[in-house]
Each structure stands twice: as C-alpha cells, then as structure tokens.
Amino acid sequence: MSENRWLATGNFFTSYKAEQRIFQTHIDRLVFIGLLVLMFVWPLIFAVSNKYMLVIDSILIAIVAVYGLNLLTGFAGLISIGHAAFVGVGAYTLATFARLLGSNHVLLTHYWPLMIVLAGIVGAIIGGIVGLPSLRLKHLYLVIATLSFQMIFQWVINFSKFYDQGQSIAIGRVFWFTGKVARKQHYFLWYYVILVVVIILGFAVRNLLRSKHGRCLVAVRDNDRAADAMGMHPGFTKVYAFALAGFFAGVAGALHAYLWRGVGFESFMLHHSISYLAMAIVGGLGTLVGSIVGPVAILMLELQVESLSEFVGHYFTSIGDVATALRPLSFGLVIVLFLMFEPRGIANWWRIVRSYFKLWPFRY
Amino acid sequence: MKNKQITIMLVALSFLLILGFSTQVLAGETYKMGMSVDITGATSDIGNPYSKGAEDYVKYVNDEKLLGNDKLVLFIRDDAYKTETTKRNFEDFLDEDIVLYQNYSTGSTLALRQDFDEEKIPTITASFHAGNLENCNYLFLPIASYSSQAVGLAEYVVANHKGSNKIKVAMFLHPSAFGRGPLGDVKKAIDIGLPIELVEVVEHGKDLDNTAMLKRFQSKGVQYVISQTVQPPVATMLKGAQSLGMAASTYGEAGKITFLGCHYAGGPDLIGLAGSAAEGFYWTTSYKLMTAKGPGTDAQLALAKRYGRDDKLANSQNYTNGIMVIQVAVEAIRRVKAKSIKVNRANLFEELQAMNGYNAFYPLTTVGPVSFSKTDREGVDTLQLYVAKGGVFHELGAPFVSEYVQKLKK
C-alpha cells in the first residue's frame, strides 16, 4: 500500500500489517464513518412508520444471522440448511425463560442484553453439537445432517407441550434507562440495539478473518488435508465454525424474539433456512459485504413479490394458485440467475465499483 | 366605489368559506378499518371469498349510504397466512388510524393479542378459537367457537347414535393452533361426562392418500370422525373412505364411518372438491347457507350479483363470513353514531360489549343473533347442523347450543 493513505491507488502492500488493515485507505474509513453516522441519525430526522421500522429491524436481524451462515458456508465451506433452526434455538432460549419464569420476569425485561448473549451461547453449544457429524461427513451428506437438525427442531417444538406446540409464546416489554419501553418507542429502540449488534459483530467477523482462527476456516475450506499438514486441526475447525454460526444465529433469534415480542414456531421453518442460504448466495458467499447486502436484497425482493402476489390475488381470484406460486417462483428464479450469471453475488458488484474508484483515472 | 368593491369581495369570500364548510359537513366522516387476510397463502381458498364478502359489503354500505354521508374505508391486505406479515399489516393499519380491525388466522391472532389490548382496538377475528379470548379483552369471535362446534358435533353423535356400544370417535385436525383449538375442550367435555371415547387424534399432513389412517380407524372401531381443518384434506379423506367402501351411507351405519366437520372443514366448496364422496357429511356452522332461502340469503346473492361475483363465490359460506364481520362493525358504528358520540375505538368497543339482550344484533346471515358482553365475546352462540345430500348441504333440525361447552364455561 502506498505511503500516502489518502491517495492510495491500486493493490500493493509494503508490509504484512498493511495488508491486514481493516480500512485500506483513510477514504475507506471516512466513508464507513459517514455511513455509520447516517445510519444512526436518519431515524431522528425522518419520521418512519412502525411498519417500515419493523421491516428495517427484520433486515438487520437477518444480517446478524447471515454473518454466521456466511462464516460457516462462505468461509468454512460447510453448507447448512438448518440455519433457521439455530436462530430458533436462540429465540426458544428466551421462550424457555418466559415459560418457566413468566414473560415479564425481570431477567427477560431488565437483563435483556445478558439474555441476548446467553441465547448466543446456547446457539453456539447446539451449533457445536450439530457440527459433530462434520468430523465424518462432507458436502451433500453434511447438508442432509443439517437438514436433519432442522427437522428435529421442528418436530420437537411442534410436539412439545412445554413450547405450546409452536404457538406464539409472549415475551414482555423490555426496560431501558427511562423505564418500560412503550409501544411507540419499541421499534425505534430495537433499531438502535440491533444496529449496534450488527456493527459489533461485523467488526468481530472482520477481525476474526484477520486472525489465525479465521484463516483456519478458509484453509480448511480450500483443502482440509493441506490444512492438516500445515498443523491446523480440520475437525476442530469445522466444529468451531458450526459453533460460531450457532452463536450468531442464537443472537439473531433472541433479537427476533424481543422485536416481535414473542416466539412462534413458524418463523424458523425449513423455508427460512433456505431464505438465509439465498441471502448468503445472492449477497456473496465468503464476503462480509455479502452478509449485509444479501439480506437487504432478498427481503426487499420478498416485499415486492408479496405486493405483486396480493395484486394478482385481488384481481384474478380464480387463479389464486398463480398468485400463491409467484413468491417461490420468483425467489427460486433469482437464486438460479445469480448462480448462473453472478456466482460471486452482489458483493462482487460492490468490489467492481470500489476498484473503479480506487484505480481511477487508470483502468487497471 | 372602492368600499363597494371590498364589500363585494368580502361577501364572495364569505360565500366561498360557507360553501367550503358545508361541503365538508356534507362529505361526512370517514371511518377506517383494516383487515389482514390470507389471499395467497395456505388457506386462500377460505380467505379469498372472505375478503370479497367484506369488500362487497363495504361497497354496499357506501353505495347505499347506510351510514348517511359518512364513508367506510376498509384496507384489505394479504398476509399469506403468516404471522409476521400479519403483524406488519397491523402496524400499517395503525398508521392509517383505523377504528376497528379484522384479523384472520389463529396463529396470528394468538401472537397479536397483546398488541390488540395495548392499542385498545376492538378486533373481530376469522379464527373462532376459544383460546383467542384468554388474556385479551379486545377480541371478538363472530360466531360460536371451534370448541362449541366440535363439542356440539360430539353431542349430536351421542344423541343420535344407535346401539349400546361405547361411541368411538376420532378427530382429524389441521396441524396448527387452528386445528388443535377445540381438542382441549373436547377432552374436558369427556372428563365431565360426554359419553364418547376419543380413540385417536390425527394431525394431517399434505397426504394425497389416507388409506392407512382410515384402515387404522376401522381396526380400532372408530365410527365417527370429527374434522377441524380446511376443506381440501377433508375432501381427500372422504374420497379415500368412499373408494375403500368405509363411508357410512346412513348416519351411524354399523361397521362404517360417519364423517362430521366444523365450520372451515365443510360447506359448498367441500362438495366441489369431494364430489359424491361428500354425500352424508355432517357439518356445522353458525352461518345460513344459500340453499335455505330467506331474506339473508337473498340479500347475499343479490350483493354478489351486484358486484359481479360468480356463483361459486356467491354461495360460499366464507363469503357470508366476510359480509357478517363487516355487518357487525357497521352496526356498532351505526349505534355509536345514534348516540351522537364520536366513532372511535373506545366507543366501538363499548358498543360491541353492549350488543346483547334486547340490543343483540340480527344480521340475517347467521342462524342466531350476535350477542357480546363483557364476559362473553363469542358472537352467535347457536349452531346449525347441515348434511350433504344430492350435492347440496341441507339444514338438519333446529339451531342448537352446545350444552357441554356451556357447562365448561361455568
């Protein structure tokens, strides 16, 4: 990297440390800080309806979940189609407390940051256990193992009287320094809480990838035998990747439970797992930016398709099935098109734009 | 001269102001309501006619000026049978400043109960699950609950069963809160003396063949199956029973199975799906069917015709269902207006709770009056039994009330 970190052009580094920097140039840092300020300030300037705050909060939660999935699938190369179940584990950790102690117990309403971390830890433990088959299984066989976990999770909740057979279990309103968070401030507060979580975990992922533990994930993905020969422990790395993914998913699940003020079985089904995978693929597997833009793209697409389906359903009642089929059809089409024409996801577009400005006025 | 010009201008201005105000007065108030309903999801075959019934009746109210110069606006949004989408719709409606809300699925009703109470918004739900009313004061079920329906059917089974053997019954349920809703109350009714044996409870999947289940029922001596689900799985089961020769040709036929079902399990659409296999299916609801001619049914058919709906929709009990919930809302608005008080959430809530005794509402689309009170928020308490014969559901006997559910309520 050039000595002048304001006018750096091209990709060349004079030290290993320079290559490992989070922000390659001061411009990168400034843009990032500007973006952060914007993210924190805009809700104070523009009045946004609860409906849209709910959508935005849900996107941020999906980003947290996809961070984990991208670590597992993108960086460690272990495909999981049980990620929604891991998110469910986090949410049902809170539901367990709600069932045992009551939905308005002080642990849930006052010590909610602790509960979010606890949900992440439970998610990590379950993730580690579910990851054990990865010691023996690879590729499609591992996919089936994660699918089994998804099915077991669904079965357990669906037939568990303790969890009310998947019916919604209420979670009480949380308290902030100013007292109980009223309905009007609910989405506003959770926007900031989830945003802070997204930023902290984003930095955590970025730093992890700079550490030997992060590079282990990539090494094991690329060639686990070579990684073994280099002194890494592929088995441990795979289990630890599952535990990491479980932690992120658990945190996302707890945030989901608090945001929606309840835990219901139907938010953690197989199609949600596939949605998370689609977010990671469309965003860009193995990239941090992909974990952020993927959920935004997929959830916005879902909203648009939802409106289209509703429109079709209203005006062509006799072909209601067409309206019903529109969502999975368009969803599947987007994934197929991305896999065919942009397998590196939207993150690649971002890379191209950045490269253009970085190299400007030269073409390469 | 100048003074004259100013005077003319002032007069003209005053005239314009008066005209403006009077136009506003003539335009009247606008009352907004929100309805979240499954139009494209798993139960769209029910949600679609339901939404059309509501939509048409709102148009009718405005076209016929049933609320005078006031206008009724109903926002209808598809929730595709998903709780998360329903919650989003609900938040959207609140931003629109609605005075009354109509919810749809059991799952979302249970999940949003706390929101209804916090917002103090009277809510009428298409889910007749008795459990909806627990820990929630602002919910109203338009008709008798699923529990009343299922227990009522079981009581009919007991009252009309021939033979001295123990009556063996199975329940065929939707795998959701909606399907499981009445199970607990059926078991409680058995505990307090309803003389049936609940041999098996089946939560159906998406099976296209029920042979194994039906054979199992037969081997266990099941004579009656009570369904609490939507029509397509019931149709599959009935077709299977017909092809296996298991369906009773007369009520309670020995060695055969007689099928019965709650509101969403039957109706004219079931005959469309199951054809001749639906013959002899016993079904209960609180709604009047188009086959029973009367002022209510005539009005419904006229309404459907007026707004260009096809025969299938016009004859659907779920079209009636949609009309009825708006009828109740309009009646509450009308009564609030008659008291010359503001039509808002609080006054509508009070008016709905006062809808009982001499103030009960007779919408003509149901087999009994709609009555709510502070302690009873199930609308129409009476149920009508229908039986499918010759490709049409016919009334069987007089409207009834489930005795055991009344006992359980005490």
Image (cartoon, coloured by chain):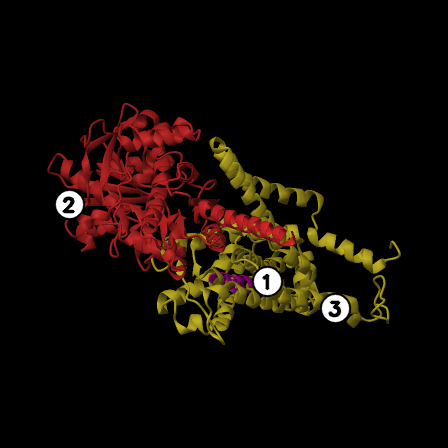
Chain colours: A yellow, B red
Q: Is residue B356 magenta?
A: no
- Labels 2 and 3 positioned on one and the same chain: no
Instruction: Give how far apart the Cα atoms at labels 2 and 3 are.
Output: 76 Å
Element at badge 3? helix
In the image, what residue type sits under mark 2?
Pro
The crowding category of the residue bearing disc 3, from other C-alpha atoms within 10 Å (few below 14, some 14 to 19, many at least 20), is few
- In this orientation, which residue lies closer to the viewer: B226 or A357? A357
Residue flagged by tag 1: what amino acid is it?
Ala
Q: Residue furthest left?
A: B164
Amino acid residing under circle 3: Arg
Residue A202 in percent (x, y) is at: 64, 65
Q: Is residue A204 above or below residue A290?
A: below
The first of marks 3 and 1 along the sequence is 3
* Residue extending furthest toward the right: A362
Q: Which mark is residue B195?
A: 2
Magenta span: A246-257
Residue A29: mark = 3
Could you tell me which chain the residue with mark 1 belongs to?
A
Q: Main secondary structure of the magenta part?
A: helix
Task: Report the residue that reaches farthest toward the front.
Answer: B1
Place of residue A157 in the rendered image (x, y in percent of width and height, measured from the top left): 40, 55
Viewer-proximal residue among A198 and A125: A198
User: Which dot, 3 or 1, sits closer to the camera?
Assistant: 3
